[in-house]
Amino acid sequence: MLCPQCNKELKFEGEFYSSIAELNSSGEIEGEVCITLSCAECNEELGEYTIELELDITNFSEDHEDENEHDLTVDLEDESFEEYVDTDTQLQHPGASATVHVSCICGKSISYAWSNYDEPEDVYKELGLA
């Protein structure tokens, strides 16, 4: 895939701009991390891209249940753009990473490292480049 501006092989750069994370009723965290993608060669902004965040924390949720109801909160830190380059195809898979903190008003908490990478074709399609 070539950059529409400079016509060089497209390599992404990314910058985190927002995130959402919520705990659903099944004990899983759902949300999204949004990044702005641009061409690494000419810095042309290509658009905004959303990466889905899913994280199963049922072990923490189940271990934390007793006769008292607990109020769990979810916070994200250190959100950033990342990439994975497939060594066989040399395709760049844009992605994101974050630290997910889950805490309760009782004081118990846990942190998870999260990352997700999407297929290049899906990214091209969402940005209107395919």
Image: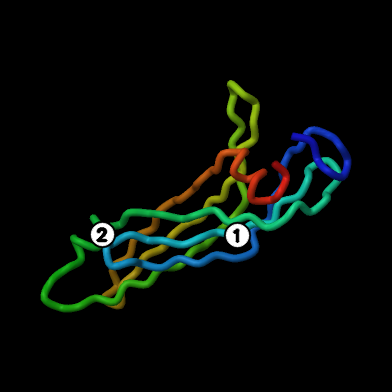
Rendered position, 18 above or below 51 = below
* Residue 97, horizontal then vertical, whole percent: 53, 51
Q: Position of residue 85 (x, y in %)?
A: 61, 32
All told, the count of numbered labels is 2
Q: Quadrant of residue 83?
A: top right
CA distance for labels 1 and 2 = 26 Å
Whole-percent x, y for residue 46 in the image: 76, 52
In the current view of this chain or complex, which residue is farthest to the right? 6
- Left or right: residue 47 compared with residue 106: right
Mark 1 — residue?
34
Q: Identify the residue under disc 2.
A: 60
Q: What element does badge 1 sit on?
A: strand
Q: Earlier in the sequence, mark 1 or mark 2?
A: 1
Point out which mark residue 121 bears: none
- Residue type, numbered disc 1: Cys
Instruction: Tell whether 66 sits left or right of 99.
Output: left
Please indicate whether residue 125 sits to the left or right of residue 6 in the image. Answer: left
